[in-house]
Image (spheres, rainbow, N blue to C red):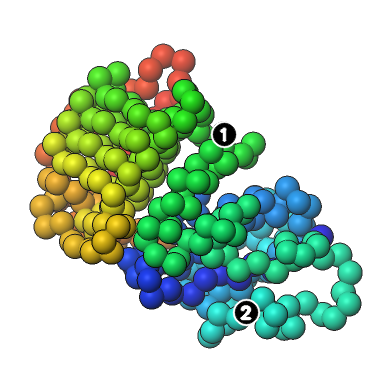
Amino acid sequence: MKALLICPAIRPAVPQLAEEGPLALTPILGECIVTHWLEHLAVLGARHVQVIAADRADAVRTALGNGARWGMRLEVHGTSVEPTPAEAAARYRPADEPGWLPAPHDTITMDHLPGGPDLPLFDSYASWFAALLAWMPRALTPARVRVVEIRPGIWVGRRAHVSPKAELIAPCWIGDQVFIEPGAIVGPGAIIEDRSVVEDEARVTQSWIGPDTFVGPLTAVATSLAWGSSLTNWRSDSSLQVPDPFLMCSLAPPVHSLASSGRGTRGPAVAAVSPLRWIAGWRGPAPGTQNSTPPA
């Protein structure tokens, strides 16, 4: 079976989300948007998917590869303008060609998550955050083996390190290789993406913390999207760059060390916050869990 996926181009309502890459690659609950869609289409039986990208198509192509991960053949086509579903079908789907998934799964614009057409991702920061919270219970698919639901409404990565003195309040999502330190409070309505750190006595409520982000001791993040040193309040649409790396910053490696990995970076590099206490205090995973190492 075949399908077309249309990557959303830059949306003026959510400019911060496109700073580091195309919206199709924005991280959501441990995966990017296009990955969630490819998993969904694979379950429906898709074996050949064409992805149409008007924004940074090379980055999308590099991130997805040839589709072997999902048991399908994958092609990424770069375009100058995001097409409508009708325009995409006219160009990439020959008339009367058999073997396509039935509508509406044959041609999809990825401006929402699977099963959530009434929850648009890019109309505003508030709508984006609402869509993530609604998707949280559905994100633990059979393919997601790195995360488990430890209590109702609380999902934690198998290689995450959560202090027994931290408090997790449902609903919340703790990603892979995340560190939650003593006295931290995460939730309700909190999503901590992979490899992030929430330090001692910090609190995260009704907020999304992007991957590789450090939230410092006693720092409170509420009703916001935080990624590296960028902080956006999803209620007011106000944004700022946090100047103090001991409050919030990026843990991603510097740009010059990423040539072979292809990862991006946001804000100050981890070298700017070398005194972080969680590195020296990390004692490894609890007995019976997989080994993990502190984020690089």
**Image quarter hosting the C terminus:** top left
Amino acid at dot 1: Val
**Residue 189 sits in which quadrant?**
top left
Looking at the picture, tell me which residue is in the foreground, 261 or 77.
77
| Residue 256 visible in the displayed image | no
| Residue 250 visible in the displayed image | yes
Under circle 1, the secondary element is loop
Amino acid at dot 2: Thr
Q: Would residue 67 be found to the left or right of residue 220 on screen? A: right
On the image, numbered disc 2 is attached to which residue?
84
On the image, numbered disc 1 is attached to which residue?
145
Residue sitting at x 86%, y 65%? 99
List x then y, in percent, for residue 228: 26, 54
Residue sitting at x 52%, y 57%? 119
Q: Would residue 285 be found to the left or right of residue 67 on screen? A: left
- Say which of marks 1 and 2 sits in front: 2
Looking at the picture, tell me which residue is in the foreground, 72 or 207.
207
